[in-house]
């Protein structure tokens, strides 16, 4: 296949956290040893906050009262959509069983984690949608303890909209802590909270590294890198919408790659013409992020046909994948590697990010080749069980004994032997391979 790069990235996004790893490890070690007091110390240092960290019912009610009515309605609308989709996912988590051979029954159960720690970015912006995405799915999954954790603002606390979203979506406790200290506090069960079994939610490189370090001690949703988005388009696509959607994702950060893959050169050239003025028209910080992302990480790739387009898309395995082309069903059936798919110009990544119902916590850095995004399933443990009659156990024990001895696992073999001797004392068995 031949691909023509009309625009080629000069840099590659990276998830390398070596520059922050030592810092994060030090904070985690300090908090594990120092407990609540050390977490409070870091809250004062990094969040410049010395207010109450575990919100009371009165504080939650007061924060909720500050949220404008229209915003409450929007949050309720988004929550209803995310909950509806999560309920559909829950229906796929069925307990099953089957008789493997006569007398031997094996099964599978889906058991939710007890405690979920949901990190919700605050900082410069209120990431309301992250509260909806993480807390709602944990609630639908059946987690008994759901902790929402978000950075407080000096002398203000957590943004009221985040408190409101966390509360109506089902958070049992709301913790006013940011960054590594917030993640560590949930993992270690500080401030009287239960220890988290799983940590979920987006965050900056320090939050991501804290989750990476704590992984195995607790579960995590995924290892997150810079967000990325890819648009597949043909001659029917509207270049203005394509350009707008690219820039809408590039504003995430200076190293957030956006890609356009098309078989129409005229479309590609028009999109490249439209992008710079669209970037310039954004607010200053957004414009700075989008300009750097477009300059250093964006690519525009020209293909010969739609099969080449699909092949290139699967190679990139984007976090967000948009199709603005004819025959949407063909694309839905053909494409295989993506975090979330947006078919047609009538939907866009921002819809999924905020309110349409699918989750916005998604695999980055080509992890969509082997993993999906946050869902009810992430909070579930898929476990197995088995039960046998003595007659059902007989052929299993014989095979187990022979295989175990072939592997040199004599202790394993004898657990089979003893059952055969007890259940069938009058029979002889050849238990050597």
Image (cartoon, grey):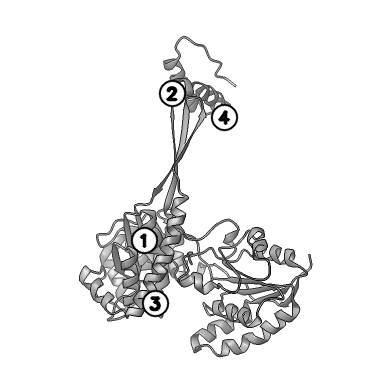
Residue placed farthest to the left in the image? 58
Residue placed farthest to the top in the image? 426
Instruction: Classify mark 2: residues with Cα within 10 Å, few (<14), some (14-19) or many (20+).
Output: few
Identify the residue at image location x=60%, y=22%.
Answer: 433
First-in-chain label (3 vs 2): 3
Residue bearing mark 4? 407
Q: In this view, does 109 lie to the left or right of 346?
A: left
First-in-chain label (2 vs 1): 1
Q: What element carries label 4?
A: loop
Give the image location of residue 64, x and y in percent.
Answer: 28, 75
Q: Quadrant of residue 94?
A: top left
First-in-chain label (1 vs 3): 1
Task: Give residue 117's mark.
Answer: 1
Q: In this view, does 55 lie to the left or right of 25?
A: left
Q: Compared with residue 400, is residue 222 higher up or lower down, i.e. above or below?
A: below
Residue bearing mark 2? 389
Give the image location of residue 169, x and y in percent.
Answer: 35, 65
Residue bearing mark 3? 126
């Amino acid at each position: 296949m031949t691909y023509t790069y009309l625009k080629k990235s000069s840099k590659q996004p990276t998830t390398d956290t070596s520059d922050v790893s030592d810092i994060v490890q030090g904070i985690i070690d300090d908090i594990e040893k120092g407990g609540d007091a050390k977490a409070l110390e870091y809250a004062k240092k990094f969040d410049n906050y010395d207010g109450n960290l575990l919100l009371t019912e009165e504080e939650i009610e007061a924060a909720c009262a500050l949220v404008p009515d229209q915003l409450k309605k929007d949050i309720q609308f988004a929550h209803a959509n995310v909950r509806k989709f999560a309920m559909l996912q829950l229906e796929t988590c069925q307990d099953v069983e089957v008789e493997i051979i006569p007398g031997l029954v094996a099964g599978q159960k889906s058991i939710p984690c007890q405690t979920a720690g949901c990190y919700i970015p605050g900082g410069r912006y209120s990431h309301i949608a992250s509260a909806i995405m993480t807390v709602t799915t944990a609630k639908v999954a059946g987690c008994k303890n759901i902790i929402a954790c978000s950075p407080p603002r000096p002398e203000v606390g957590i943004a009221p909209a985040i408190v409101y979203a966390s509360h109506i979506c089902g958070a049992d406790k709301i913790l006013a802590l940011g960054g590594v200290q917030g993640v560590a506090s949930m993992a270690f069960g500080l401030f009287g909270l239960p220890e988290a079994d799983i940590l979920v939610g987006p965050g900056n490189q320090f939050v991501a590294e804290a989750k990476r370090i704590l992984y195995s001690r607790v579960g995590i949703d995924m290892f997150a890198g810079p967000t990325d988005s890819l648009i597949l388009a043909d001659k029917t696509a509207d270049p203005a919408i394509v350009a707008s959607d690219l820039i809408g994702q590039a504003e995430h950060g200076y190293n957030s790659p956006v890609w356009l893959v098309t078989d129409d050169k005229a479309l590609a050239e028009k999109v490249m013409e439209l992008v710079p003025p669209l970037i310039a028209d954004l607010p200053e910080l957004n414009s700075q992020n989008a300009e750097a992302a477009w300059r250093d990480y964006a690519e525009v790739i020209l293909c010969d046909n739609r099969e080449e387009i699909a092949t290139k898309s699967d190679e990139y395995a984007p976090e967000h994948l948009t199709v603005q082309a004819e025959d949407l069903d063909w694309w839905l059936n053909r494409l295989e590697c993506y975090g979330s798919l947006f078919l047609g110009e009538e939907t866009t990544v921002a819809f999924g990010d905020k309110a349409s119902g699918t989750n916005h916590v998604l695999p980055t850095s080509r992890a969509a080749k082997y993993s999906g995004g946050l869902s009810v399933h992430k909070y579930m443990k898929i476990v197995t069980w088995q039960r046998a009659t003595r007659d059902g156990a007989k052929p299993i024990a014989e095979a187990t004994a022979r295989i175990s001895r072939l592997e040199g696992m004599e202790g394993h073999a004898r657990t089979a032997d003893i059952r055969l001797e007890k259940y069938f004392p009058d029979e002889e068995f050849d238990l050597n391979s």
